[in-house]
Image (cartoon, rainbow, N blue to C red):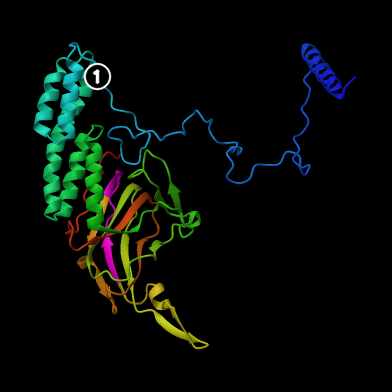
Amino acid sequence: MSSRRIFVYFVIAALASCLAARGRGVLLAAPPIQDEEGEKGKKPADGDDEKTPPEDAPPPDEPPPQEEPPADNPPPGDAESEPVKIPEFTKDTGKEEFSKAKSLFDEGKWKDAESAFKKLKADAKAKEDKDIVDSWALASGGGLVLERVKAKVKQRQFTVAQREAESYLKKYRGTPIEPAYHQVLQEIEKELYVVIESFDVPSSAFSEKYGKTYVNDADVLLDGTRCLRWANTKERDNVTLRLRNVPRDWSRMEAVEFWVRITAPPSDAELVVGCGEPATTKKKGVAKTTKKKKTDDDTGSAFQAQIRLPSGRQWQRIQVPLDAFQAQGDANFATVNFFQIQVGGGKQFDFLIDKVALVKKSGGAAGAETPKKAAPGKK
C-alpha cells in the first residue's frame, strides 16, 4: 500500500475516533501549540491585539460606568439629593405650563415665574401637587429678595448682606431657591472672615480629659460639619480653650467671632489674645525661634475682653470688636501668638462651639452685641 493511501487511512480513522468520543460526551484536549523552538503557549508580544483584559474590566459590549448627573437644586454638600418632583395636574397642559414656569425661574425672571406658578396651583391635582407648585412660587419670591442681597454684596456691605441672607433663608429653606442662598453666603464668608478653627478635623489638642469632645450629631450641628463640645471637669476648675494656629498680624481685622449653642452657661468668660515677639536663642551657631514662656502663661503682653455667654439651646453668634479688648503690657495686634477663651471655675457649664473666625476690616463688624437668635434652621 502506498504511503499516500496509508496517510488517508489514518486520517479517516482519527476522525472516526473523535466522532465516537464526542458521542459518548468525552472531550479530547488539543495538544499545546508549539512554535519552531518548541515553546508551549507563548504569550503575545506587547502591542498584540490578543492581550487578556484585566479581571475587573467591563465586557467589550458594555460601556464603562458613567457618573450620574447631580439632581436639580441639590442642597449644599448633598450629592445624592432627590430629583425635582413634577406635580400632577387636572389639565393636559399642566405639565407643559409647569415646565415653562420653571424655565422662567431658571432664567431669573422671578416675577413672571412667581405669577405663572401661582396660576398653576389651582390646577394641581392633589394636595401634595399643590404644595410642590406653592414651593416653587415661594422660591420665585425668594429669588427676587436674593437679588437685593446680591446688590449689597456688590456694594461690599458684607455684614449687612450676611445678616439679611441668613434671616431670609429661614423663610425659603426647603424650597428650590435654598441652594442659591447658601452659595451667596459662602461667597460672603470668603470676603468677611479668616477662619481660625472650624473643628472639622479632630485634633489631640482638645482632650476629653479637660472636658472637650467632638460632636457629629446632625441634629445639633451648626453647618453640617463637626463642632466641639466643652463642659467642665469634675473638679470644676478654671479652664481654657487655646488656639495657637492663628494669623500673626491682626491689624487688618476688626472683630473676633464664634458660634455657641449653650445648654448650661458658665459663670463668666474671657477672651485673651496673647501677643509678643518670639524669643531667639542660638545653639551651635544656628538661630532658633521659640515663644516666650511669659506670653504662653498669660502673664505677659495680651489683650483681654470679658464676655457673656447667654443661655439658650440654639446657635448664637458671638462677635466682639477688637477695640473692645483691653491691652495688658506691650500688647500689639501685629504680633499675635495665640487666642483663647477662658471660663471661670466653680459652676457647671456645658456648651457647643464652632467656627472661630476673624472679621476683616473691609466687612464691617456688627458691634459688641451678642444676638440672641438662632442660626438659620437650627434648634
Residue found 15% across the figure and 51% down from its top: 153
Q: How many marks?
A: 1
**Residue 107 seen in render:** yes
Magenta stretch, overall SS: strand
Residue range of the region highlighted in magenta in the rendering: 303-316
Q: Residue furthest bottom?
A: 285
Image location of residue 233, percent across then percent down: 46, 55
Choose between 74 and 38: the one closer to the eye: 38
Give the residue type that dot 1 points to.
Pro
Image location of residue 72, percent across then percent down: 28, 32
Mark 1 Cα shell of 10 Å, populated few (<14), some (14-19), many (≥20): some
**Residue 374 seen in render:** no
Classify residue 146 as left or right of residue 63. Answer: left
Residue found 41% across the figure and 50% down from its top: 229
Choose between 170 and 174: the one closer to the eye: 174
Does 308 lie within the magenta span? yes
Image location of residue 29, percent across then percent down: 78, 26
User: In this rendering, is residue 127 above or below 306?
Assistant: above
Residue found 35% across the figure and 79% down from its top: 277
The residue identified by callout 1 is 87
Choose between 92 and 114: the one closer to the eye: 92
In the picture, the quarter occupied by the N terminus is top right
Residue found 36% across the figure and 62% down from its top: 342
Q: Residue furthest right?
A: 1
Does 336 lie within the magenta span? no
Secondary structure beneath disc 1?
A: loop
Classify residue 144 as left or right of residue 330. Answer: left
Image location of residue 373, percent across then percent down: 22, 45
